[in-house]
Amino acid sequence: MTGFIIRRVLSSILVVILTSIFVFVLFFKGLGDSPARNACEKLHNGRCPAPVLASIKHEMGFDKPVATNYAIWAKGIFVGRHNVYSDGKGYNCPAPCLGISQMTSNTVWHDLKTKYPATMTVAVGGASMYLVLGVILGALAARWRGTFADRLLVGGSLIVSSIPYYLVALLAWIYLSLQLKLFPNTGYYPITSNPGKTIAYMALPWLVLGLTNCTSYARFTRGQMVETLNEDFIRTANAKGVRTNTVLFKHALRAAIVPVVTIFGLDFATLLAGTIFTERIFGIDGIGNWSLQALQPPMDINVVSASVLVSAILVVVANLLVDILYSFIDPRVSIA
Amino acid sequence: MSTVTNSDIERAPDRSGATVGNETLLEVRDLKKYFPVKSGGVIRRTVAHVQAVDGVSFTLNKGASLGLVGESGCGKTTTGRLITRLYDPTAGEINFEGTDIGHLTRRQMMPIRSEIQMIFQDPYSSLNPRHTVGTIVGTPLRVHNMVPEKKTLPRVQELLEVVGLNPEHYNRYPSEFSGGQRQRIGIARALALQPKLLVADEPVSALDVSIQAQVVNLLRDVQDEFGVAFLFIAHDLAIVRHFCPEVAVMYLGKIVEIGDRETIYEHPHHPYTQALLSAAPDVKQAAIGGRRERIRLEGDVPSPINPPSGCRFRTRCWMAQEICAKQEPPLLQIGKRHKVACHFAGEIHQAPARPITTEMLGVDDQGNPTGGATPAPMQDQPGFADSWFDLKSKSVTSA
Amino acid sequence: MSTDTFERADDMAAPANPSDPFLVVEQLTVKFPTHDGLVQAVTDLSYTVERGKTLGIVGESGSGKSVSSMAVLGLHDPKHTRLSGSIRVDGQEVIGAPEERMRKIRGNSIAMIFQDALTALHPFYTVGDQISECYRIHHRVSRGEAKKRAIEMLDRVGIPQANRRVDDYPHQFSGGMRQRAMIAMALVNDPQLLIADEPTTALDVTVQAQILDLLQDLQREFNSAVIIITHDLGVVAELSDTTMVMYGGRAVEYGATREILTHPEMPYTWGLLGSIPEVAGDANTRLIPIPGNPPSLLNPPSGCAFHPRCPHIDKVPGDLCRTTLPDLVPGDRGANHVKRCHLANPSEIYAGEVLPEIAPDLIDPETGEMIPEIAEVDPDEV
């Protein structure tokens, strides 16, 4: 088990490093000196004298090879950097240094820490909602497969998944929150200060995320369950006199849930890396919104690199956790 | 192929060896296949080996058939896959018409692949459900450029007819056929390249009883007509007996007894062969009076990762003694066409009191080296020698 | 068994006469409606099983042999199954019985053993958990007691170090041990009827012999009724008292096992006997297969379902085989041996034509008669 985890952590680190190199190099090469030019124009009201540009380029490292720049950037994550040049000024950037955000002039790490709890709250609440709802609905649909309720679920899920998510979210917000006032206005309030308010303000985003995503989980779970219910060991359980519901939820669901967990792990990681539509529509100040803003010109390259790095780490960690979880669900999977 | 008349039975040839050429087609020498077992540490070292096949030697003449019998995990299927080069051997030689094909590259194997074909156990999963029968049978013809493109279809139809299927059905999909018919398709595919050797891995064990007989008879016809040599791998002793004039019994990666059919079935000398023969339920015996007395083996086959020392069968053998744990019995030729690997080889209830192998191994009755005697080299050679160790006289005799 | 204080479902009813057969199946018909039409899986099947006796049901895939026993436990999905006829367990009708009553019978007074224990046991639960679950469904006992019972049963079926192996998962067992565990699970509630569906098909011969021995010992010990479903006539020959041969969803021959195997009267049974290669006997003879393929259950052949494959059809006058379904009636050998065939003189044909082909060694070469020890089985003896 330990050997497996160490091996997987090592390979995960490799994946993260390769992703960061890939992204860093592509942006560095692709943007050329335009970040320097932007900074220069900002400082001199749209004009950019050549000596100033040259000095800014030097400060920003454009006169050095990309490998050197990557090394400086990567080293900064661990030991911090001094005198990080941005907006014509030098900033101090303690470890873990991901650079300075041009939008806020804060360190990227500082902004990330501020914005992350909101995204986390959206993701955890939404994901648990769609997982639980989806699996239960799917299991029940499998039990009553072929009936009207089953067809309703399968058909309904098709309709829901054919409507763009942002439309559902927007309409839900307009009708449920603005018009009918069933939910308070949305936004993020730190869970540490007032949990009741957090839940009240997050309820609608969670519900929308949960309901729209649970349909695909319900269908997937249903498919897995239908397959599992045809297995020999289900017949054995029935022949033992096990109650129908026990057969369904103890014997069948445990076997059917393994692939669902895999998909969920990856979905959840993506969700943690930012839920752009949810955050935009419901006015939640999370990292999805943050990285979206960073993409608008002039691009805040440090923020973009940081968010790519974060999502790479999240996906890799989620994969690792799913693999470890596997060995707990399925004793045949030996991850020794 | 669907109706059988008395004339079919009469024309069944005697296959005790007379009709078969004496030219060696396949000679397997000390073949080994070890699958690595990896450790769970940070660096995955190979900590052990599954000794799936551990030093198997035999020969197969042109147009002859050899049965490979044993229980699950004995290495019979691995042996078949080594010979068809689906696996790479760990050690040993596979001499096919004089060429050692054991270590040829993919490219070098290409011309030989058409000569060695395989029939698989499961007629459901071994045929691609999305290809028509015509495509399945015709693909090997195209891959090996056996016939011009235009002649492919007539050749496919000819093959379908040979295996007793309607040649007009070349356009159908495997799902439209029953299990027995699918196995016929598999046979047609294997025959397409006119191979010299067919490795049949449990070709009938997935089929219903009444269909099994049809397929076995078809395989016999195929052999008669095309002179193909068969390596017939099966767990069912009765089926093998009906098909193969020569039989090798495997246990835990080794051949424990090999010989002609009469010897193996009428006068088995290895306790495992005796147990296997006695274990199979027999309709006629039982119909007369309930369950007959039989040798009952205890327990299960040990792990091939860590096989027992000395004789691998000793943990389940009712005759095992000290020497069996200490010395591995050599595969000793004890008859004209009969080899057995047992310290106490003998017919059932007539096993010798003293081990027969002490002198050649240079050990005493308990298996401890005596030092005095010089052990004769006991290298197992494929095939049979002209002289052998006679159990009665305890000396080497020849025909 | 001292812990057995829980009331059995079947005890609640008026006590059945213990000399009556434990299981009576009468005119059982099972049909499955499908998109392609109605699958007539079992038609008009009747049989009985007494306590302490074994019934062997023989047939090929699609003969309906497993379907009928699943019906005994009410395991078919009622939405997709049409059942008719009568199945009485210890005097109680189970067709149409409420689910709750069926549930109390399953695993309790009737238990089942399935073919492939690797797929028939849940891969994610330990062997011990699965056995104790079966015990706890039908007995009010603590987890600890149930586990103790599981260990006791594992020990009884010959699993070494049962108290340690009880916590193993099925994949950690060898094939033979898994089948033993399966038997332990089936026997944990002392069932009065054990249905074994191809219990040894997936096993090696030496292990198969061990399992058959075990089944026979356990049956003697518990005096339970056993139904053994198999395609292997050898297994039936060794274990069962009576044998029923099924073809195309119907019984085609039914009687004492020795009778059926030594004096079969139905060409399909002859065919089965002829198809089996033997370990002894002349190896150079060709096997005598049954030509053709098993019948479709969607569109069963007219008349006798076996007629398209029957080599003796010309011995029946007229078109009888093609047009008329023969009744299951006694043949030449008395009332205890019934067969579904129009042939007027099956014994003669068998002795004169079939036996010399399929088992020439059983014919006395001098007299041309059957070897006496086989010929002299008294049909009324069993």
Image (cartoon, rainbow, N blue to C red):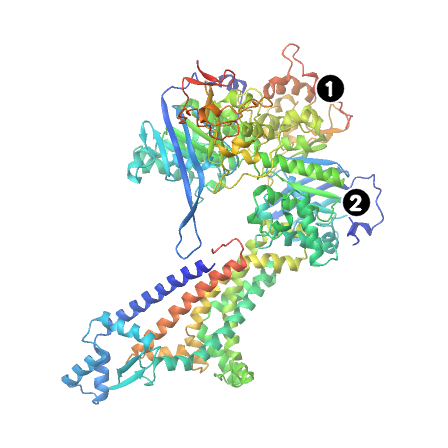
Q: Residue furthest top?
A: C366
Q: Is residue B273 above or below residue A180?
A: above
Residue neighbourhood size for the residue with mark 2, other residues' Cα within 10 Å, grouped as few (<14), some (14–19), many (≥20) = many
Residue at 49% in and 83% down: A190
Q: Which residue is mark 1?
A: C376
Q: Assess whether mark 2 and mark 1 are in contact (beta carbons under 8 angstroms).
A: no
B124 over A259 or under it: above or below:
above
Q: Is residue B289 visible?
A: yes
Residue type at mark 2: give it.
Answer: Asp
Residue B373 placed where, x, y %? 43, 24
Q: Mark 1: which secondary structure?
A: loop
Residue A164 seen by the camera: no
Chain of the residue that carries numbered disc 2 in the rendered image: C
**Residue carrying label 2:** C90
Q: Nearer the viewer, residue C85 or B91?
A: B91
Total marks placed: 2
Residue found at the far bottom of this picture: A45
Question: What separation in Å lies between label 1 and label 2 (alpha carbons)?
Answer: 35 Å
Q: Amino acid at mark 1?
A: Glu
